[in-house]
Image (tube, helix red, strand yellow):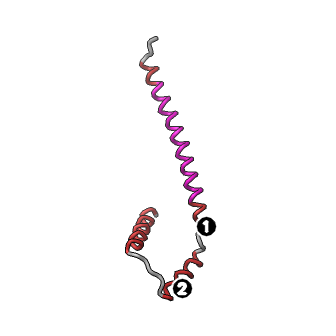
Amino acid sequence: MIISREECQHAVKRSARESARVDNAVIRLVEADVITSVTANVNHMPDREDRVRELRAQVESGTYHRTGEEIAVAMGRRALADRIR
């Protein structure tokens, strides 16, 4: 049996469309997992006011200490967040 050039091209195009559908489905699943994870993390975070109160108490008592690495990481996160906006 001989397969025509058109049949070959059609098969390649169909394979690419099916692959794109699978890729999109995987992306949606991954995005759903990420959204679920982020939501769970946010729900377990203390309220901002509570965190500010806790940090203020540490600063006032002299027990608030951060390493240079922690400060650098925070600065990097802030720069990235500013770029995303």
SS at circle 2: helix
The amino acid beneath tag 2 is: Ala
Local SS, label 1:
helix
Q: Is residue 17 magenta?
A: yes
Separation of marks 1 and 2 at Cα, in angstroms = 21 Å
Q: So how many labels did they put on this image?
A: 2
Magenta segment's dominant SS is: helix
Residue 40 higher or lower than 11, as above or below = below
Q: Foreground residue, 45 or 11?
A: 45
Q: Residue at x 41, y 19 (%)?
A: 5
The residue drawn where x is 47% and y is 24% is 10
Farthest residue toward the front? 63
Residue 42 magenta-highlighted: no
Q: Residue at x 51, y 84 (%)?
A: 58
Please state which amino acid type lies under the numbered disc 1: His
Residue 68 position in % (x across, y down): 37, 75
First in sequence: mark 1 vs mark 2: 1
User: In the orientation shown, which residue stands out farthest toward the top?
Assistant: 1
Residues rendered magenta in the picture: 10-37
Classify residue 82 as left or right of residue 24.
left
x, y (%) of residue 79? 40, 67
Question: Percent x, y for residue 14?
Answer: 50, 29
- The image's mark for residue 57 is 2
Q: Nearer the viewer, residue 60 or 31?
A: 60
Q: Is residue 70 above or below residue 9?
A: below
| Disc 2: CA contacts within 10 A as few (<14), some (14-19) or many (>=20) | few
Q: Residues within 10 Å of mark 1 (few under 14, many from 20)?
A: few
Q: Which residue is tagged 1? A: 44
Residue 19 versus residue 78 in the image, above or below? above
